[in-house]
Image (tube, coloured by chain):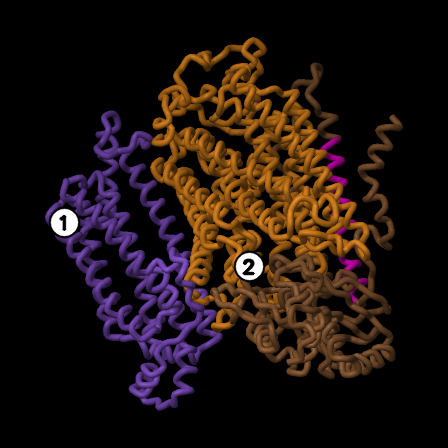
Amino acid sequence: MSEVAVESPRSAENYLTARRGVMSWLFTLDHKRIGVMYLASILAFFLLGGVFALMVRTELIAPGRTIMGRDMYNHMFTLHGAVMVFLFIIPGIPAALGNFVLPIMLGAKDVAFPRLNLASLYMFWGGAVFFVVVLITGGLETGWTFYTPYSTTTGQSSVVAAVVGAFILGFSSIFTAVNFIATVHTMRPAAMGWFKMPLFVWALYATAIIQLLATPVLGITLLLLALERLFGIGFFDPSLNGDPVLFQHFFWFYSHPAVYIMILPGMGITSEIISVFSRKHIFGYRFIAYSSIAIALFGFLVWGHHMFVSGQTRLASMIFSALTFSVSIPSAIKVFNWLSTLYKGSISLETPMCYGLMFIFLFGIGGLTGLFLGSLSTDVHLTDTYFIVAHFHYTMMGSTAIAFIAGIHYWWPKITGKMYSDAWGKFTALLLFVGFNHTFFPQFVSGSRGMPRRYYDYEKLLPAHPDFHGGHWLSSLGSYLVAAAFIMMAGYLLVSIVAGRPAPRNPYGGAGLEWQTSSPPPVENFTTPPVVGDPYDYSKLRFDPRSNDYVRVA
Amino acid sequence: MFASPNAVIIAMTEADQATHDNHAPFLAHHFDSPRQQFAAGKLGMWLFLLTEILLFGGLFCAYSVYRANHPEMFQDGHLFLDRYLGAVNTCVLIFSSLTMALAVSAAQTDRRRLLVGSLIVTLLCGVGFMGVKFVEYKAKWDHGLVPGQERIAWFVALGWLRKDSPAPERGYQPDADYVRKHLAEHGEEVDDAEATRRAAGLFPFFGCYFGMTALHGLHVLAGMGAITWVLVRSIKGHFGPLYFGPVDFVGLYWHLVDLIWIYLFPLLYLIH
Amino acid sequence: MNQILSSLAAIWGPWAQSGSQPYFWLPDRASTFARDVDWVFNFILYVSLFFFALIVALMCWFVLRYRRRPDRQEVEESPHHNTALELLWSVIPVILVCLMFYYGFEGYMDMRTPPRDAYEINVIAKKWAWLFKYPNGYVDDKLYVPAAEPVRLVMTSDDVIHSLYIPDFRVKQDLVPGRYTKMWFKAIKPGEYSLFCAEYCGSGHADMLSKVVVLEAAEFAAWLREAGDFLKKLPPEKAGEELHRRRGCAQCHSVDGKAGTGPTLLGIWGETHRMTDGSTAVVDENYVRESILEPGKRIREGFVNQMPTFKGVLSDEEIGYLIAYIKSLGGSAKGESP
């Protein structure tokens, strides 16, 4: 066994220490620093959205007024939705983790347009400032979907500020997408063909296509909404021959593909993790890669399934329902491929893998409950009830956010150069798993029994539906478990930055290029050009107990 | 007059060999060669143009829906636009696309005077287009044809900062007398009540007209800003066969702005 | 151990008590649609449960069986891909989802195709009340329908989008301002069922509740006849009280002195109130009438106008009843006859 690459991973200057001072961060063009700043900002908004969620759950823990009145409740659930969707889950994986690892995975020094990348971060902050303005100047209680004519007539909301914020965030997201596509096309090393790319890169590429094609439509929609509210230019106002349902078409033309903006990168992370921690080549690489692209394209054709009861024609509903079912197939393919990757592997249950398996479990529930909503007659009963709420929390939080957390744990040693406590990590994962299901599973039952969503109270419903109380009660208790898990996670991750053991180059034995550079990487990503090979070939990697590192053997 | 694209790429490839070790001017540190930098930039620009098309796509879609729902209102509406001014603007923009293409070619073949001259002409065409647009908008404003006009006036006059000026009601009331006279000019005599009804019915058309042309106008302004930036750099002599990306990309953008107008003109001015 | 069990029982208690429902997943079945929808629901449920159990069982088994242990470090040989297998697990789901689509579509077409002879009721939704208008012109805030007879609802909204949802009937349809949407159902058993607003519509969204009362056909006819003449038989202030409840005024205007979305009606007759534009107004017949027909004209200080106009919804006679009712609720001018 002869070792190559014996260079100590800690000797070189890395991207964190190369330059110091606030300005060196604010004006950096380094994709890694931009990714880290994105990560910190996005997690801050996750905290904010989480606080709103806890307020909502606490209000609903008992019938009648618990901690706030009805208008306050409406502000809370809207802000929870808007902050989580626009500031956490859409930018989450691509802008934070994608920015950090994508160029390294491709063996590039940076993304194609570093200035555009920095601009996108500033636009993210700019959009976020508008949301802060919303919080200060009257809140938002239209629901995050801004349905007209409610959003154009309500007097209690800073709709324009929110809409302008979302517009700016949209362009931030477009900039990231342009960057990723151009980087994937033009910055790959010559030896890396399309089918030698890691699946996370495929997922980010598919995501970028959706961001690019869908976000401008949201942009123009929000612009029209703002103009209507400010100046009464009534595109969506029925009293001026406008059409309020057209807004829903426009809105969902973006916001349904946005669901795949959220989930695809999560699937990409899961593909990486399942393979690495099974030490086995990913099963059905091409099927997984193609299914990402298939999801991205089909995702554009299904927006009308949000509108089966809006009064759209029967024909439209029929087409949208059929297309909706077609999206479920590529997702099913991915799940079966992950399972086959586990088969006969050498499975190690470290923290990222716990989250990876959790993703399969929760995405299984989230995906399968989607079938009830794609089917026309059951959707009529279930839409706008807690069943929907549970369904999209299983996919957005149970799948995307869990994959995001999995990714943070997987690349944490690479990003920070420190190892966190694996024992704490596993325990937190277990608590999060229990808490999550405790929160959202009861909502399926409440919902299918008829509990409508966005109700600030259910006291008046109890005489006819005494069971609604139990669902809300369990759900609220579960939300405290989830909160506890996130507090613990923040705790051990922050401790690791200060007191963690220094990370080796390749602690988990990944075969991607990002594991060939030191942890954390140098400013230029690689001191020597990386060896491009099959990103899922583990046969040349051996664990070296002296350095706790996986090393490449000839 | 125009450099063949192949010749340009061969030139760049040769430059790649020559400059592999010491960087070519304006080659960013993370690119290996000017060729890679140009390819990335060009792809990025096309992707951006795609988003621009989709941004307008939303408006074209709204246009189709409203025109299908209210064909008679669109028929009425287009009578109020001056198709001669529209045609002049179309010609101005098409001509400016030609000069822009000349500028790109001049940058590739290192003819600086032609480059600067073409860019100046392109910029002047942009100014001319916006001037005509201003004349047209002014006329619409004077007759109250702009949707949300009172609220816009109130907003611009900072009425929303003052406690004593409540927001004007939403609504659409063009000058009915003008509408009656204008319809009469087009051979349709209507009474006052009918004129008021028809005036109110102009709303969807002018909603589309102002939504689309204002967004397009903003793009023309942005394009003029970009041309100015490229012009300054041309005067400084930054561009040549090895580095002409910015001129090329701004050119692409300008052609797109031109193209969108070529669709807007018949859709708004030439309805039958 | 017992302590743990009893505390768990305390936590899950409210959930356990909810066993009064006839089915675990779904509410009562009270319309002809319910059986079909539930059939599709259960079909999807059992298919999903089968696949979910399969996925989780395989996952757990693989993780346990192929766990990395000191004596088992290496992976075993197995292929990277298997086209036949991949096609198999693509095609089987395709067939299953085709079935799901078809059954759902069949049920939906049924829901969207009302029979021609259906009994027609008009529905108007406004923030935050339901008005049901029967063929004889009578309006109520509850939906009374005959059993075993198709009923067609022709619906619109006065302000924002609402959605009419009757869980026990498995029906839901949005009400959109500026257009009419339609739905139909056939109730199968007499009784009282919940009716919710399912599309978020502002502050009082969760208060926009009503009931569907299903009566036997003969009973329904008798009820409608009785209800139609109902107001004329009552003294004006009693008629006003009924209208206040049935036309949805009570959603925003309390009669117990507490301000809601709008001012309370208790003790305001003859009072002088400050308006948002700085003027003052005396609550008299003219002001009440104006506030009903043109709610936005003069708004009492401290309130934001949320009220839609009732022009064409309330007759002059009915406005008279409401005025009589507000008078009866007292105020400084009580007893003075105008």
Is residue C57 covered in magenta? yes
Relative to A432, A518 lies left or right: left
- The residue that label 1 is drawn on is B116
| Image location (x, y in percent) of residue A275 | 60, 30
Three-letter amino acid code at the position of disc 2: Gly
Comparing C162 with A141, the one in front is: A141
Identify the colour of chain C in the image: brown
Q: Residue furthest left?
A: B113
Dominant secondary structure, magenta: helix
**In this rendering, is residue C61 above or below A216?**
above
Q: Amino acid at mark 1?
A: Val
Which chain letter goes with mark 1? B
Chain of the residue where label 2 is placed in the rendered structure: C
Q: Which stretch is magenta?
A: C33-60
Q: Colour of chain B?
A: purple
Q: Tell me the CA gap for discs 2 and 1.
A: 64 Å
Closer to us: C251 or A479: C251
Q: Is residue A260 magenta?
A: no
Above or below, comparing residue A135 to residue A325 in the picture: above
What shade does chain A have? Answer: orange
Task: Name the residue rendered at 46%, 46% in the picture.
Answer: A133
Residue displayed at 75% across by 41% down = A474
Q: Position of residue A126 (x, y in %)?
A: 41, 43
- Inspect this view and state whether residue A248 appears: no
Q: Are marks 2 and 1 on the same chain?
A: no
Q: Which residue is mark 2?
A: C302
Q: Secondary structure at mark 1?
A: helix
Can residue C226 be seen from the camera position used here?
Answer: yes
